[in-house]
């Protein structure tokens, strides 16, 4: 059942089944089993019910897949609990979100809530989909832990394009979202729309567009400035800066100026090979 990567031994040695756990993230969920693991990337605990044993094994494999791919940014500072929930209603109840039918998981500082993969669709989910989702959500937890402590992570003013862009970039999810050409056409049709700076209601109505814009904006950041600048942004936030302050310190321009650069790149279709000239500052 394991993929044989270098974290497999650490996982196997750390497995521990516990009965009658107390507390739960969602009132309708009675978790009775847990699996724990310790790896060089971080400590994890997977909690699930007896009816979700098969899905829990698939989540374990997804965790093993995710760990080496997260390390490009750093390692977790605190343990993360992955809570396996029986259906979509339980997930929405646990994370306090309603009406997001496309939502299958939610990552926080030290928790990841996951809807049981067998309930994602009539046919359920294949392992590659689970791997991708778990990597995406764990990247959120890693980003929050590298940029703040438990009390401060939600006050860092990290914009959605950076949060979701970093997670999607790490999980290799470009194929899931709109292309740069489709994003350019959207901006032509609705010039008042700003899915990067002001996703607003678009997040609920057209998540494909918002996630695609985030992915492409973050990719643009990495290609222009390099992954080390991303790590520097996280370090600056960890040292006390908010995201706008950290971004300007690490990258050399304000986040709004970067978003304008990216939007111009998309509107002028710089991705076709043309050169976008930056205005002097």
Image: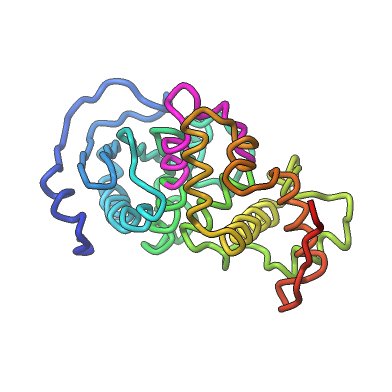
Give the residue furthest to the left: 13
Residue at screen point 54% across, 28% down: 154
154 within the magenta span: yes
User: Front-most of 249 and 190?
Assistant: 249
Q: What stretch is highlighted in magenta?
A: 139-159
Residue 152 x %, y %? 50, 24
Q: In this view, does 248 lie above or below 165?
A: above
Give the residue furthest to the bottom: 273
189 within the magenta span: no
Residue 249 x %, y %? 60, 41
Q: In this view, does 146 lie above or below 60?
A: above
- Residue 274's quadrant in the figure? bottom right
Residue 88 x %, y %? 50, 41
Q: In this view, does 214 lie to the left or right of 230?
A: right
Residue at screen point 26% across, 39% down: 43
Residue at screen point 47% across, 33% down: 238
Q: Is residue 180 left or right of residue 122?
A: right
Residue 9 x %, y %? 13, 54
């Amino acid at each position: 059942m394991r993929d044989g990567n270098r974290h497999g031994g650490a996982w196997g040695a750390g497995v521990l089944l516990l009965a009658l756990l107390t507390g739960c993230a969602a009132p309708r969920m009675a978790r009775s089993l847990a699996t724990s693991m310790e790896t060089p990337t971080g400590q994890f605990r997977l909690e699930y019910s007896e009816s979700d044993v098969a899905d829990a094994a698939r989540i374990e494999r997804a965790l093993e897949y995710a760990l080496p791919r997260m390390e490009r940014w750093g390692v977790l500072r605190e343990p993360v609990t992955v809570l396996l929930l029986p259906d979509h209603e339980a997930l929405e109840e646990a994370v306090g979100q309603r009406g997001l039918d496309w939502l299958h998981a939610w990552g926080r500082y030290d928790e990841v809530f996951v809807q049981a993969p067998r309930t994602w669709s009539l046919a359920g989910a294949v392992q590659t989909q689970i791997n991708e989702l778990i990597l995406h959500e764990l990247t959120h937890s890693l980003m929050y832990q590298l940029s703040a402590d438990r009390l401060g992570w939600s006050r860092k003013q990290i914009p959605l394009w950076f949060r979701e862009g970093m997670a999607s970039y790490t999980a290799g999810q470009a194929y899931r979202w709109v292309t740069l050409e489709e994003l350019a056409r959207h901006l032509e049709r609705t010039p008042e729309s700003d899915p990067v700076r002001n996703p607003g209601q678009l997040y609920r109505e057209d998540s494909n567009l918002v996630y695609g814009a985030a992915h492409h904006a973050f990719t643009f950041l990495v290609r222009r400035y390099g992954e080390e600048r991303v790590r520097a942004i996280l370090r600056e936030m960890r040292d006390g800066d908010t995201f706008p302050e950290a971004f300007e310190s690490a990258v050399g321009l304000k986040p709004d100026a970067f978003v304008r650069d990216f939007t111009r790149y998309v509107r002028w279709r710089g991705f076709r090979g043309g050169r976008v000239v930056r205005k002097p500052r």
